[in-house]
Amino acid sequence: MSERYDVVIVGGRCAGSALATLLAGRGLRVLVLEQAKALRNTLSSHVLQTDAVTFLDRVGLTEKIRSTGAPFMNRVDSRVDDFHAVIDYPLEPGDVGGAVAVRRDVLDPLLADGAVAAGARFRLGAEVTGIVRDAGGRVGGVRVRCGRTERTVQASLVVGADGRRSTVAALCGARRYNVTDNERWYYYTYFENARWEQPTFVFHRWGDRHVFGGPADNGRYLVGVSPEHHERAHFRADLRASVRAHVAGCAPIAQALTEARQVDKVYGITGFQGYFREPAGPGWVLIGDAGHFKDPAVGRGIADAFAQAQQVAAIVGDLLPEHGAERLDRALAAWGRSRDRRYADFYWMAADIGCAGAIPAVYPALLGVLARQGRIEEYLRLYSHRRTPTQLMHPGDVGAAILAMLRAPGSRAAGASELTSTLRREARRRYRSLRPAFAPATDVGEVA
Ligand SMILES: Cc1cc2nc3c(=O)[nH]c(=O)nc-3n(C[C@H](O)[C@H](O)[C@H](O)COP(=O)(O)OP(=O)(O)OC[C@H]3O[C@@H](n4cnc5c(N)ncnc54)[C@H](O)[C@@H]3O)c2cc1C
């Protein structure tokens, strides 16, 4: 038995449902294949950055998001070592809120329903196990197992939106490159009865600590902490107490939780890698985590999945109906190159924020410069990808930040040495962005 669609999307969460919504909305015949039998929870906190909130509005989900009880957070309480400020999110025309936190077992079904409402077919319990190629070797469909039946679905394009352990990537032979190992673990949990006045996202990164949190859907308050490898035994001995101990150093969250009760277990991830994957080939393309994953410290994965869905939808929606496969493949290959250029800076920034120990001193120094110039909200535009780190750090500001580092009392030698290692690291990264270091073809990423 065989069916035929314009586009088959493997994976039905942030990236897959978003793309399905956009393509079906343009009249394409779209099938989403999701191996899970229901879109229950998945291991991910869920701070949605401004551009992600705007995307949800674009696809008509704002009222549904509001009805989950998740308040739009329009300011950030941000601490980065000795820099501390409460900053309003800079909103642009069309934005509906600064950030919002909706748990994945609430958010993902809303996205899937949106795809179905737009006209996509959405099949749960459908695991993709193989790809099929045409006589010329171009990918032309997938093999999918639903219960005991296995069938072929043909499509003009196969999209891998199937996460970090992407089956589509493995089947198409997409290699990973510029792989980084995590230096911290991430744990998060939920409280009820937290007290807060204005909905505020709290993000504190000081010394070797990282604590974040804010009000989420259905009266929950999300709290995340990020211990380092050396804390392993101690932290895991009593997860609840360990979370509380980390939070104790973050005044706004500690205060919010004074009378709060923990209502869920502590979720955590102890091993992951950041990477880029070869993004596209004849008949296939990868979006979301399937193609690129970065340290979750920056809370960008969902927004990036939405952004990539929009970029790919524009290309496929324009080219697929009227132009040949060859032109589509060329355009998607070009998109893949632009993806790498677009995300390289942000990738390394995420690694810096998620690094063991203190964040590189140039960051708080630079934030101090921006604050003194009355431009601190520019910093938040990094999180919505409306500024790149390179745009933010123009040479004059970096120079001022370096001077501030070198002038800090008693730290001239330490400042100079850190500066040297920051410059060396930066040079290495720029080189890697131009000449990627590939992992072996047999390495498909995390396996457990
Ligand atoms: C600890 C942690 C915290 C995070 N916190 C945040 C945060 O606060 N904000 C943020 O924006 N991002 C966060 N992220 C990142 C975010 O979780 C991801 O970027 C996001 O889930 C990517 O969505 P996706 O649709 O690409 O992939 P996924 O959400 O992984 O979805 C992939 C889907 O594909 C399906 N699938 C896989 N293989 C097959 C197959 N063979 N056949 C059919 N279906 C298949 C899977 O079942 C799954 O449902 C965090 C990540 C982690 C690990």
Image: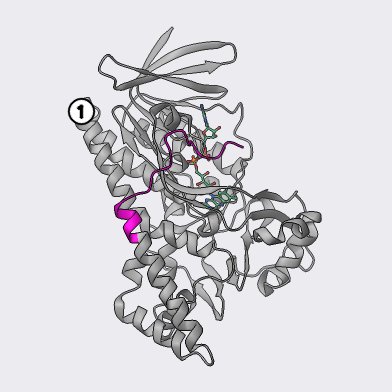
Q: Nearer the viewer, residue 98 or 438?
A: 438
- Magenta span: helix, strand or loop, mainly? loop
Give residue 136's position: percent from left, percent from top. 25, 18
Give residue 424's position: percent from left, percent from top. 39, 69
In this picture, residue 71 sits left or right of residue 323: right
Give residue 371's position: percent from left, percent from top. 44, 82
Q: Nearer the viewer, residue 89 or 153?
A: 153
Measured along the vertical axis of the image, is residue 159 above or below residue 41? above
Residue 442 is one of the magenta-drawn residues: yes
Q: Please state the extent of the stretch shown in magenta in the rendering.
A: 430-448
Residue 309 is one of the magenta-drawn residues: no
Is residue 385 visible in the rendered image? The answer is: no
Give residue 141's position: percent from left, percent from top. 37, 20
Q: Residue at x 46, y 84 (%)?
A: 405
Q: Residue at x 48, y 57 (%)?
A: 49
Mark 1 element type: helix
Measured along the vertical axis of the image, is residue 100 above or below residue 22? below
**Quadrant containing the C terminus in the rendered view:** top right
Quadrant assignment, res 20:
top left
Quadrant assignment, res 174:
top left
In this picture, residue 339 sits left or right of residue 222: left
Residue type pointed to by label 1:
Glu
Is residue 72 visible in the rendered image? The answer is: yes
In this picture, residue 176 sits left or right of residue 214: left
Residue occupied by mark 1: 326
Q: Residue at x 67, y 72 (%)?
A: 250
Beta carbon of the mark 1 residue lies under 8 A of ligand 1: no
